Image (cartoon, rainbow, N blue to C red):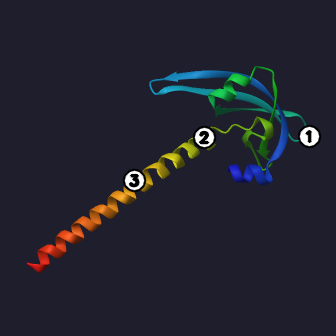
Amino acid sequence: MLFSLKTRGKPSRATVYDVWPEYSGRGIKYFVTVTYEVGDKHHLKKFTQQIHKKHYASLQRGQPVSVRYLPQSPEIVRLADEDKDNLRLFWYTLLAVIAITLYYPLLIWAIFVFAFYQHKFRAYSEE
């Protein structure tokens, strides 16, 4: 979907309708609701998107923002261009850093375990 928006999405003018935090037992999530124009008839639609805390702090009601929507499915829309929110990019980057950080120690551990058991197996088979 995000790739389709980037390649086939149509840019549109939009306005921040509301921004708010949502509290839960797992922490705080931040959201923005935006109204945007679809097509040349100035038909207004509204959508809500979860955003990063830093982006939340920079948005205000009535602020103009950029969005992209799919012309064949105008309900598929996201903040775009200079207003693009990188919440998913943040989490994917964090996950990649964790995976890389854990990969090498686990790989070294696996090599040592393999070598240890291979040595024990050879000693057992020679008896």
Residue plotted at (77% across, 40% down): 80
- Marker disc for residue 105: 3
Which one is earlier in the sequence, the residue at label 2 or at label 1? 1
Quadrant in the rendering for residue 44 = top right
Callout 2: few (<14), some (14-19), or many (20+) C-alpha neighbours within 10 Å?
Answer: few
Task: Name the amino acid, label 3.
Answer: Pro
Q: Horizontally, is 32 left or right of 64 in the view? A: left
- Which element is circle 2 on? helix
- Which element is circle 3 on? helix
Question: Which residue position is annotated with label 1?
Answer: 40
Question: Which residue position is annotated with label 2?
Answer: 90
Task: Name the amino acid, label 2.
Answer: Phe
Residue plotted at (52% across, 47% down): 97
Horizontal and vertical percent for residue 109? 33, 57
Residue plotted at (84% across, 39% down): 12
Callout 1: few (<14), some (14-19), or many (20+) C-alpha neighbours within 10 Å?
Answer: few
59, above or below 109, in the image? above
112, above or below 27, in the image? below
Q: Horizontally, is 44 left or right of 77 in the view? A: right
91, above or below 1, in the image? above
Horizontal and vertical percent for residue 30? 61, 27
Is label 3 or label 2 in front?
3
